[in-house]
Image (tube, grey):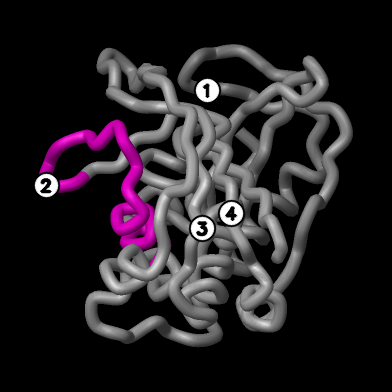
Amino acid sequence: QTIRTEDAEKLHAMSLRPFSQYLAFDNDAPCWYINTYTDEAADHLINPLIKSDHLHCRHKGYDIGLSEFKILREESYKDLEKRCWDKGSNTKSIQIEFKTSTSIKSHNTYVIYPTPELIFTGLINKWNNFSDSSILEEDNLAANLAQACSINNYSLRMRQFSLESTWVDAFIGRLSIGRFRNSTAKSMVTMLLDYSQYTGIGIKTALGMGGVSITVKQM
């Protein structure tokens, strides 16, 4: 509890929250990844945490010590978009690593196999809600992008996520997208999946689900 109560209440009241976070192990050490995708969220979350050496978990009633904070990436929507469109045409394939339990909700059902269209739909929705650069207005864009690429390879397994007293069906693992039909699809998918490293993929990304990283293979 390092964030002002009014700021925390404002963030949690939003239907789409401008931050994601998850816990993962890197080199056997626990690392807490916090991602924000608006300036306001960065001011409310990142800046207070950088100055803190511990967190108080009010809900659980204990403190957690924090070690060194590092800013891994910082860029504007415009810069992210330009970088991906400049280099995206050379993309051969993109591997998504689902680092924490991931689930996508569709028609009130938890989907435990990620299709490109479902992945793109969620990312386009977040981009259009938070971007201060371009808006992706094309009709049926997610479906069109899904038709312009294919899943190359995947290695996924079930891993449920505990959400208070409920277990949510979910998955972790890797999935590779490629075989792009045109250069526009390459650049657009590269941009959206790069953005997913900030937003996460699927539901409950503010609670630790859907943490991802990507690896782009160039031609």
**Viewer-proximal residue, 90 or 68?**
90
Place residue 22 in its image quadrant: top right
Count residues near mark 1 (Cα–Cα under 10 Å), then give few for <14, some for 14-19, many for 20+. Answer: few
Q: Earlier in the sequence, mark 3 or mark 2?
A: 2
Residue 185 lies, with reference to residue 20, above or below; the image says below
Marks 4, 2: nearer the viewer = 4
3D distance between C-alphas at marks 4 and 3: 6 Å
- Over which residues does the magenta segment extend? 106-124
Q: Please check the rendered image and state whether residue 157 is part of the magenta-colored stretch, yes or no.
A: no
Place residue 149 in its image quadrant: bottom left
Count residues near mark 2 (Cα–Cα under 10 Å), then give few for <14, some for 14-19, many for 20+. Answer: few
SS assignment at label 1: loop
Residue beneath disc 2: 107
Residue beneath disc 1: 58
**Viewer-proximal residue, 207 or 137?**
137
Residue 10 rendering spot, x and y as whole percentages: 42, 55
3D distance between C-alphas at marks 1 and 4: 40 Å
Is residue 7 visible in the rendered structure shown here?
A: no
91 relative position to 19: left or right: right
Is residue 13 visible in the rendered structure shown here?
A: yes
3D distance between C-alphas at marks 1 and 3: 45 Å
User: In the rendered structure, are the residues bearing label 4 and label 3 in contact, judged by CB atoms less than 8 Å apart?
Assistant: yes
Residue beneath disc 4: 94
SS assignment at label 4: strand
User: What residue type is disc 4 on?
Assistant: Ile
Residue 69 rendering spot, x and y as whole percentages: 83, 40
